[in-house]
Image (spheres, rainbow, N blue to C red):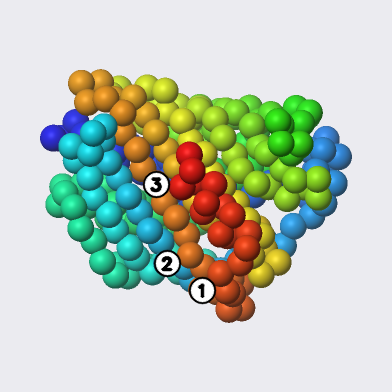
């Protein structure tokens, strides 16, 4: 059981602080790929739904919590939880604690999709016509993804998908992640993160996180069509 808990916790680390978005204002050739600025996400309040499981649901747990960033500080309050006590405590609770530690210490830029963390090349069009930008991490880090960013024609980030630049532990391999985004209240925000990995002696493990926003940058928001579409996309995967 300790192998399972440790591995799921490692996957949780990859879902902490999902990249806030692409930042063409950071300079370099990247600006010409996207051609637009973006209103930063400074604060929010959201109900977060988290689900961690192993292959065949041998070990599985769910958790819902109100999460908030305000004044540069992250806080959370658990609403409900069920399933494996070990997975809840060692994975889902630990994930929230780790995010609180990173945000409150000011280390939030380590996973952002910026020229400081990535090299970018134009990748043409996806099968649905969306624009593709290939992203290559500049360092080996569990918060960075080697793969691609998918954008709409206006430069809005739809999702980031690929393999983690660094495996979280000896026990894990082929760690894949999909982060989905939507524009809510005029701000581009993460709406879902899904991470899967192969685990030695255990099989496939999965972690899914969904965000339901109540307010963004001090303004109340409602359930938008963009959020519904993003959630439907994750559910269909």
216 shown above or below 23: below
Alpha carbon separation for disc pair 1 and 3? 20 Å
Up-down: is 221 above or below 81? Answer: below
* Most foreground residue, 28 or 44: 44
**Other residues around mark 2 within 10 Å, as few (<14) / some (14–19) / many (≥20):** some
In percent of width and height, residue 70 lies at 51, 72
Tell me, yes or no, whether the two marked residues, 2 and 1, touch with CB atoms within 8 Å: yes
Q: Which residue is mark 3?
A: 208
* Residue 189 visible in image: no
Residue pointed to by mark 2: 47
Which circle marks residue 66 in the picture?
none
Label 1: state its secondary structure.
strand
Q: CA distance from mark 2 to mark 3?
A: 14 Å
Asked if residue 199 is positioned above or below residue 209 in the image, the reply reads above
In whole angstroms, how far apart are the C-alphas of marks 2 and 1?
A: 7 Å
Secondary structure at badge 3 equals strand
- Are the two marked residues, 1 and 3, in contact with CB atoms closer than 8 angstroms? no
Label 2 or label 1, whichever comes before in sequence order: 2
Residue drawn at the location 82% of the way across and 38% of the way down: 33
Q: Earlier in the sequence, mark 2 or mark 3?
A: 2
Name the residue rendered at 37%, 29% in the picture: 197
Q: Give the x, y percent position of residue 195.
A: 42, 38
The residue nearer to you, when weighing 154 against 76, is: 154
According to the picture, the residue beneath numbered tag 1 turns out to be: 214
């Amino acid at each position: 059981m300790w192998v399972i808990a440790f591995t799921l916790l490692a996957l949780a680390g990859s879902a902490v602080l999902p990249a806030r978005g692409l930042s063409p204002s950071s300079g370099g050739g990247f600006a010409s790929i996207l051609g637009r600025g973006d209103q930063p996400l400074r604060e929010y309040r959201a109900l977060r739904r988290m689900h961690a499981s192993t292959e065949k649901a041998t070990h599985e747990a769910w958790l819902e919590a109100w999460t908030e960033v305000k004044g540069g500080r992250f806080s959370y309050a658990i609403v409900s939880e069920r399933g494996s006590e070990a997975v809840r405590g060692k994975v889902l609770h630990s994930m929230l604690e780790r995010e609180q530690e990173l945000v409150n210490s000011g280390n939030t830029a380590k996973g952002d999709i910026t020229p400081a963390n990535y090299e970018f090349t134009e990748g043409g069009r996806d099968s649905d016509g969306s624009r593709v930008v290939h992203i290559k991490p500049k360092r080996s880090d569990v918060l960075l993804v080697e793969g691609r960013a998918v954008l709409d024609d206006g430069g809005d980030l739809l999702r980031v998908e690929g393999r983690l630049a660094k495996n979280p532990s000896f026990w894990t391999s082929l760690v894949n992640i999909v982060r989905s985004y939507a524009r809510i209240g005029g701000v581009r925000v993460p709406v879902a993160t899904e991470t899967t990995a192969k685990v030695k002696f255990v099989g496939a493990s999965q972690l899914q996180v969904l965000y339901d926003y109540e307010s963004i940058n001090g303004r109340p928001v409602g359930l938008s069509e963009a959020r519904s579409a993003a959630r439907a996309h994750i559910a269909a995967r």
